Structure formats: structure tokens, C-alpha cells
Image (cartoon, grey):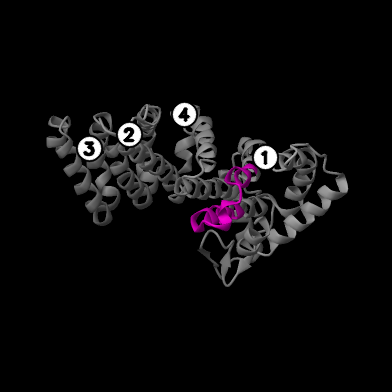
């Protein structure tokens, strides 16, 4: 820690300190926070190359996953400067193949960092007073990268991240949670307590969901995220029929749709889809027609499309992906 503070301008010192801390997290746990915080601070504020940011992502992700609440203060303090630095590198002009590769790696590392925040259940970091002002920019960047074909690796990470965000922030607490094989709510992994009734456990879990929910995000979900899910296949122009990786993107899109269906409930999603498809699908389909002529989708056609859509959702992610294709 002392050496890093004095020689933080040297990349080799920053790298050595970073790698040492990452190896110690597993055995030291939250006890390492006191020592790793200044190392991260000196390291992040001294970064000169985008490849260093990529190297810090596994350290920060491991730290959040292992230490959870203990690292909230550190992440609240460091996430803003780190995101500002990432933005600077992402907006730099590319002049060669090497820089293009570094840029793609940086995008993926950035998305994996945000995904790590949600996987570690530390998403309140993004809602803190220090970082809330950056939330809309973060969400918009995720949508942009989810559409960035033909960079399908970046697309897959972005879509996977959308699934995690929807599950965390858009789940309707009033929906019943299933009890399956001694577990309550298949997504949380909490074992059934024999001294509690199923109703009591469901009430506890629904209270937790309500505490995590971000009501403003539900509006963003319907107005921004879902329309993009329908546009991505048009951008890809059926390349998934020949490209295995592009085919995986469609599978990830199916997973996002299914996460909305599970989070908001089949009836709410069906009602929204009927109105949106009737208003927008005809215009979108016109982009694929040779004559480019727009056609209005009737209310009956919209309802039939939605019924098939929802039935496929209920059949599971794999069957729904086949339906989308």
C-alpha cells in the first residue's frame, strides 16, 4: 500500500499491486477493504491506457462479489471517476486495428463491470447520491452496445446485462413467487424454513423485491429497452441463419423478453405488446419490404401476434428463441 502510494505513476507497480490484491481477496475477504481501497484509488486515478481499465475490472468484480456491503463505500467513491475515465477512452478516435481491438475490449470490460455490480447484488451503488446522475447515461450505453452488430460478443454481454437489470429493478412485488423443491422463488436460492409457512416466506421475499424495485425503471423498460429488442434482429438482417454467434444473440434477446415476462407478469406484458405492435410493427416490417411501403397492423393481427408471442414465452427461453427466428 505504501509503495503504491509513492510510486503509483509507474504502471508496473500499479499492475503488481492490483494482481496481488486480487489474489488475496479470496482468503482475506472484507478484511482487505482497508488496504485495497487506497491501492484502487491510486491505481484508477493514475491510469494512462485503456488496457489498464480492462485489468481492473476482474479485481473490482471479485471485490464486490466477496465483500458485498463492506465495499459499497469504496465503490461509491471510485465508480464515478472510473466511469468518467472509461468515457474518455471510449470517445477517442480510432486510427488502427490495435486501437479497435482495445476499444472493443474496453466496451466488454465496462459492461462486465456493471454486470458484476448486479451479480453481486450491489446495484444500489448506481442509485447512490454520488452515481445517480450517471445512471441514464449507463442505461443508454448498454442499449447502444446491445445493437452494435456485428460485434456480437459485446451484444451478448449487453443483453445479458439487460436481463440482470430487469430482474433486479423491474420485478413486480405483487406477483406470486413459486415455491419449488424447497426453494422460494427459483431465482434467489433461499432455502425453505420449516418453521415458516409458504405465505410468510413469500411475503418476506416480496418485501425484499419491493425494496429493490426502481419504479422509474419500469417506464424506461417499456419506452426504451423493449423497442430496441425488436429492432436488433432487423439490424442483423437474418445473419443468425448462417452465423452461430449471431444466433446466440437472438437467444439472448429471447432471454431478455422472458425476463420482462417473468418480472412484470404475462397479462401486463400482453397488454403493452398489443398496443405497441399495432402502432409500430407495420412501420418496422416496411423496412424489409422491397417497395418500402408501410402497412398498418390491424388490431386483430396485433392480438394474434401477441398471443403467439406470449405462448412462446411461456414455453421457455429455447422455444421462444426458435419463435423469434
Name the foreground residue: 254 vs 164: 254
Asked where in the image residue 211 lies, by quadrant, the reply is top right
Q: Which residue is mark 3?
A: 39
Q: Which residue is mark 4?
A: 129
Marks 4, 3: nearer the viewer: 3
Q: In this view of the protein, can residue 268 be seen by the observer?
A: yes
Name the foreground residue: 186 vs 7: 7
Residue at 24 percent of width and 57 percent of height: 27
Residue at 34 percent of width and 30 percent of height: 95
Q: Are marks 4 and 1 in contact (CB under 8 Å)?
A: no
Where residue 52 sits in the image (x, y, percent)?
27, 38
Residue at 22 percent of width and 43 percent of height: 18
Within-10-Å neighbours for mark 1: few <14, some 14–19, many 20+: some
Marks 2, 4: nearer the viewer: 2
The quarter of the rendered structure image containing the N terminus is top left
Magenta stretch mostly in which secondary structure?
helix
Q: Which residues are magenta?
A: 231-255
Is residue 151 shown above or below 8?
Answer: below
Earlier sequence position, callout 3 versus callout 2: 3
Where residue 152 sits in the image (x, y, percent)?
48, 48
- Give the Cα separation between the discs numbered 3 and 2: 33 Å
Q: Are marks 2 and 1 in contact (CB under 8 Å)?
A: no
Q: Secondary structure at mark 4?
A: loop
Name the foreground residue: 201 vs 323: 323
Earlier sequence position, callout 2 versus callout 4: 2
Within-10-Å neighbours for mark 2: few <14, some 14–19, many 20+: few
Earlier sequence position, callout 4 versus callout 1: 4
Asked where in the image residue 179 lies, by quadrant, the reply is bottom right
Marks 2, 1: nearer the viewer: 2
Position of 272 with respect to 215 (left or right) is: right
Amino acid at each position: 500500500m505504501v509503495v503504491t502510494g509513492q510510486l503509483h505513476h509507474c504502471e508496473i507497480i500499479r499492475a503488481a499491486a492490483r494482481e496481488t490484491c486480487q489474489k488475496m481477496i479470496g482468503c482475506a475477504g472484507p478484511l482487505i477493504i482497508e488496504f485495497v481501497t487506497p491501492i484502487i484509488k491510486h491505481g484508477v486515478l493514475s491510469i494512462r491506457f485503456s488496457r489498464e481499465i480492462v485489468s481492473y475490472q476482474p479485481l473490482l468484480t471479485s471485490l464486490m462479489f466477496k465483500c458485498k456491503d463492506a465495499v459499497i463505500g469504496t465503490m461509491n467513491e471510485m465508480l464515478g471517476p472510473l466511469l468518467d475515465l472509461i468515457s474518455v477512452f471510449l470517445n477517442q478516435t480510432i486510427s488502427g486495428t490495435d486501437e479497435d481491438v482495445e476499444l472493443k475490449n474496453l466496451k466488454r470490460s465496462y459492461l462486465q463491470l456493471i454486470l458484476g455490480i448486479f451479480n453481486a447484488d450491489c446495484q444500489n451503488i448506481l442509485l447512490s447520491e454520488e452515481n445517480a446522475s450517471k445512471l441514464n447515461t449507463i442505461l443508454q450505453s448498454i442499449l447502444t452496445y446491445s445493437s452494435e452488430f456485428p460485434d456480437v460478443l459485446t451484444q451478448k454481454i449487453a443483453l445479458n446485462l439487460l436481463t440482470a437489470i430487469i430482474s433486479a429493478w423491474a420485478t413486480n412485488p405483487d406477483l406470486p413467487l413459486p415455491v419449488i423443491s424447497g426453494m422460494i422463488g427459483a431465482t434467489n436460492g433461499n432455502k425453505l424454513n420449516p418453521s415458516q409457512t409458504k405465505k410468510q416466506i413469500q411475503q418476506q421475499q416480496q418485501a425484499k423485491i419491493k425494496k429493490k424495485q426502481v419504479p422509474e425503471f419500469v417506464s424506461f423498460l417499456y419506452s426504451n429497452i423493449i423497442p430496441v429488442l425488436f429492432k436488433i434482429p432487423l439490424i442483423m438482417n437474418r445473419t443468425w441463419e448462417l452465423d452461430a454467434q449471431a444466433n446466440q444473440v437472438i437467444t439472448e434477446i429471447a432471454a431478455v423478453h422472458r425476463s420482462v415476462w417473468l418480472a412484470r407478469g404475462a397479462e401486463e406484458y400482453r397488454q403493452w405488446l398489443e398496443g405497441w405492435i399495432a402502432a409500430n410493427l407495420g412501420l418496422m416490417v416496411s423496412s424489409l419490404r422491397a417497395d418500402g411501403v408501410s402497412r398498418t397492423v390491424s388490431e386483430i393481427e396485433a392480438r394474434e401476434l401477441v398471443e403467439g408471442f406470449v405462448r412462446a414465452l411461456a414455453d421457455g427461453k429455447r422455444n421462444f428463441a426458435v419463435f423469434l427466428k
